[in-house]
Amino acid sequence: WGLGFGVWVATMTRGAARVGAYLVLLTLLVAAGAGAKKDKAASSKLAELEQLRSLSWESKDGLIFIDNVRKIEPLLKGSERPYSVVISVRLVDDMLKNEGVKTQKHAKAIEESMKSAIKLYRGAVAKDQEELFFISLEFNENTQKLFQKMEIQSFPTTVLVPKKHQISMNDPTFKLGQQFRFTQSNQKEFYEFLEESFGLGVFESKDEKINVSVFNIVFGYGVIILMARMLWFFSQKGLLVPMMAIGSIVVFWVSTSGLIKCIIHNLPMVVSDRNGNPQVFIADNRQQTITEGVVMSSAYLVIAFAMSAFTYVGKTFVESTFKSVFLWASFIIGVMTYAFVIDCFQWKTHMSTMIYGFNL
């Protein structure tokens, strides 16, 4: 019995040794396969890094334009990318033409901000060491689902995908938090967003210094003194009150025209429709052209002058026929101009007007 038990133990030991050897071999094979797969993935990402560098330098300004999902999906998926990408929404030209002036300005501003950021980055990093790339991704039917995964719902929106962020095309969203989003187009704020995200010390924006020359100071004081002298002269001639009246009319005209806003925001005189025809009025209650503002403020003055002429000027005429024609002309011009203003208001705001309980 003792001899049989010894043989059984020896047999079991040899069997266990064989199983252990098989397990070790299997583990080594799995590790080797995983390592080879990882090396293959790393090699693939390095190839994509070189592809991005090539695409960036093929473009004159370094901005990569992509309009197809197949071109960008391989560049995004995974979590061990040796590069980061900044993706900005780009609207197709036909879509942009149908948008308001503000949207068109945002589109131009964010593109210029991207290009200037690339210029700064290229000036600080060698060509073969670039690891940050800027992509302008067109919004169309092909890329719409990708925008949904990035949770982009407004324009302008720019998102960045850092190196270590996990991207899976099977997930409903890419889980890009607010810290990875920029929803403005201002260049200085864009630089601050990039610097906070990457901390490269490349996108530090400096406040522009305002240089005022001695000539400008002397000229400004000269204009003030000249205007004060002119006011004193008019007051001596009894013309100060008429000058103040004319000045108040000019101030009213400028204030109601929106010229100050147009100058600050650099709005155009007119815009072009989809057929390239000039368009004075914009169907957007938040935007206008310079010409539109001038036309509307001038219409207010026409109404005021018609009322003044009907009330004060008409009664000064003695000849009844001329007086009657003048009063009727003032009345018709005032009413037609008022109707024009109301029609423009309803067209831009899609709101009905009611005065003294009556719909107009």
Image (tube, rainbow, N blue to C red):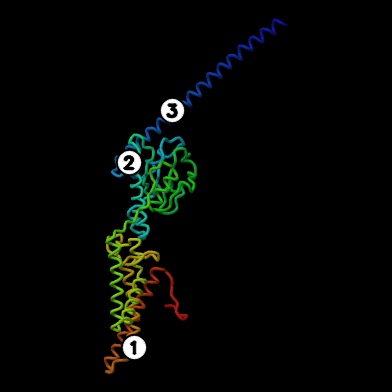
Mark 1, Cα crowd under 10 Å, few <14 / some 14-19 / many 20+, is few
Res 324 quadrant in image? bottom left
> Which quadrant of the view contains residue 248?
bottom left
- Above or below: residue 359 compared with residue 280: below
Q: Which residue is mark 2?
A: 123
Q: In the depicted view, which residue is nearer to us: 238 or 289?
A: 238
Name the secondary structure under disc 2. helix
* Residue type at the position of mark 3: Asp
Disc 3 packing (10 Å; few <14; some 14–19; many ≥20): few
Count up the numbered dots: 3
Secondary structure under the numbered disc 1 in the rendered image = helix
Q: Residue furthest right?
A: 1
- For marks 1 and 2, the one nearer the N-term is 2
Which residue is labeled 3 in the image?
39
Say above or below: 120 vs 36.
below
Q: Identify the disc placed on residue 312.
A: 1
Between the C-alphas of marks 3 and 1, the distance is 92 Å
Locate residue 94, reporting x and y percent. Answer: 33, 55
**CA–CA distance in space, label 1 to label 2:** 70 Å
Residue 140 visible: no
Mark with earlier residue (3, 1): 3
Instruction: Give the distance between the C-alpha atoms of the residues marked 2 and 3, in whole angstroms.
Output: 32 Å
Q: Residue at the location (59% across, 14% down)? A: 17
